[in-house]
Image: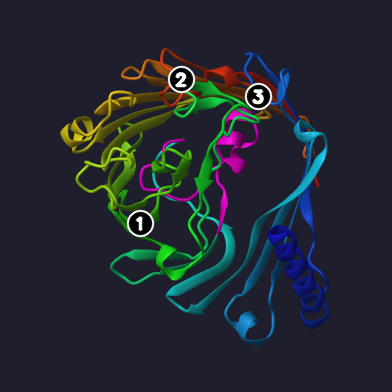
Amino acid sequence: MKRFLFLFVALSVSTWVGPLYGAMPEIHGFGEFAYGVKLSDDTTKRNSFNLFEQRLQLKTNHFFEEGYLGEKGGVFNLKGDFTVDEYYSGKTGFELRELNLSLSPLDMMDVKAGRQVLTWGTGDYLFINDMFPKDYVSFFTGREDEYLKKPSDAVKASFYPQMMNIDFIVVPCFTPNTLAQGDRLSFFDSFQGGIAGTNSDREIIEPPWRMSNNEYAARLYRGIGSHEWALYYFKGLYKNPTGYKDELNRELFYPRVDVYGWSVRGPFFSGISNLEFGYNRSREDSDGSNRLIANSMLKVMGGYSKNLGNDWSVGFQYLFENRLNYGNYKDNLLPADYVFDEYRHLLTQRITKMFKNQTVQINLFNFYSPSDSDGYVRSSAAYDINDQWKVTVGANLLWGEDDITQFGMMKKNKNIFFRFRYHF
């Protein structure tokens, strides 16, 4: 109901914007058919596929020319997706991805208010200081990369003083990550003691909408020589339900967290390198003694990418995670609890090759964790038939020795996917 209310408001605004400020803006977008064949058996809702949908995306914007908004470069942006999801027997839906107004009230200040996709950091599919919501169901089923980033209802103010640039974001409406719940994708459910599908029975408690649950994020960045340096701060909630509110009633919740970090990115040995650091302070378990809430963590990531010429490019990343106060964590575990490691190492590799005047793109992205003994091969081949038509095929191949690791818990969701898209 909330999503359709947003759409009604957007259409109402468009109704009076047109007559007052000129002709109605053009509408662009695409229509898409997507299908993903399952390669593994599990106990989810469907046995043969985990992606089968038709999607229509419409987007438009309006540049104000008169009044205050015209003087300040005001732009109204609208983007939304209509879907028919055959996985749920033809269920129709609408996702409002953008509904915002951007303007420059001062020469050194930009503001964007409304629904928008927020992102920052230096990682490729890896996020340390980017605490904005993600859709991992889209990621693991084979939707376009655009759908990994979920929109937020937020106000973003950007300042450009001489010394550095500053982004400050306020998010009054909490939006969690979209994770496997057992209906479309199976996952490790600690209450079931293994990988679960539709038999998963748990409740995730979302925080109420009030001032104390507002989220705040800030980034300070500037170029020094040929490198960009940045400092990050986030105060809000984990986007995954990493806390147990009531074990007996199988209730999970989103604990509070502060994140402090920095990054640097720039040229290195004829390529581009990046280094990023983050400290996650678990505000509700700062000393690590509460077995029901995730511990604080340190995360460090280094990466390197290079264009090899002839439309070849490669990229590599290494991520190190350290669970802090590990002794307190282990001392307070119960005999039946699952034990997570103190350290985690993750390696990634991306290989991209273009063919046929760059109309054919081959991507191979590989995650591998030597500490968890698990991994994820994400591959795709896309062909731009012409300016309107595009076809993509790919595969999501997940594996792992243990069911509790990040990719091991998803190993029964392997698929081969196909997308056919028409742009207009």
The part of the image, by quadrant, that contains residue 12 is bottom right
Q: Which of marks 2 and 3 is nearer the N terminus?
A: 3
How far across and how far down the image is residue 102, in percent? 58, 70
Span highlighted in magenta in the image? 125-152
Counting labels gives: 3
Which residue is depicted at the point 24% across and 34% down?
322
Which residue is depicted at the point 65% across and 31% down?
183
Q: Which of marks 1 and 3 is nearer the N terminus?
A: 3
How far across and how far down the image is residue 142, in percent? 64, 29
Q: Which residue lies furthest to the front in this view?
A: 248
> Which amino acid does the dot numbered 1 rest on?
Phe
Disc 3: which residue: 44
Which residue is depicted at the point 61% across and 42% down?
147
Tag 2: Cα neighbours inside 10 Å, few (<14), some, or many (≥20)? many
How far across and how far down the image is residue 210, in percent? 47, 68
Distance from disc 1 to disc 3, alpha carbons, whole Å, reads 36 Å
Residue 128, magenta (yes or no)? yes
Is residue 14 left or right of 121 when viewed as pictured? right
Visible residue check, residue 231: yes
On screen, 371 above or below 240?
above
Q: Which of marks 2 and 1 is nearer the N terminus?
A: 1
Mark 2 or 3, closer to the camera: 3
Q: What element carries label 1?
A: strand
Distance from disc 2 to disc 1, alpha carbons, whole Å, reads 29 Å
Visible residue check, residue 421: no
Q: Is mark 2 on a helix, strand or loop?
A: helix
Report the disc number at residue 348: none
Disc 2: which residue: 408
Tag 1: Cα neighbours inside 10 Å, few (<14), some, or many (≥20)? many
Disc 1: which residue: 234
How far across and how far down the image is residue 368, in percent? 40, 20
> Which amino acid does the dot numbered 2 rest on?
Gly
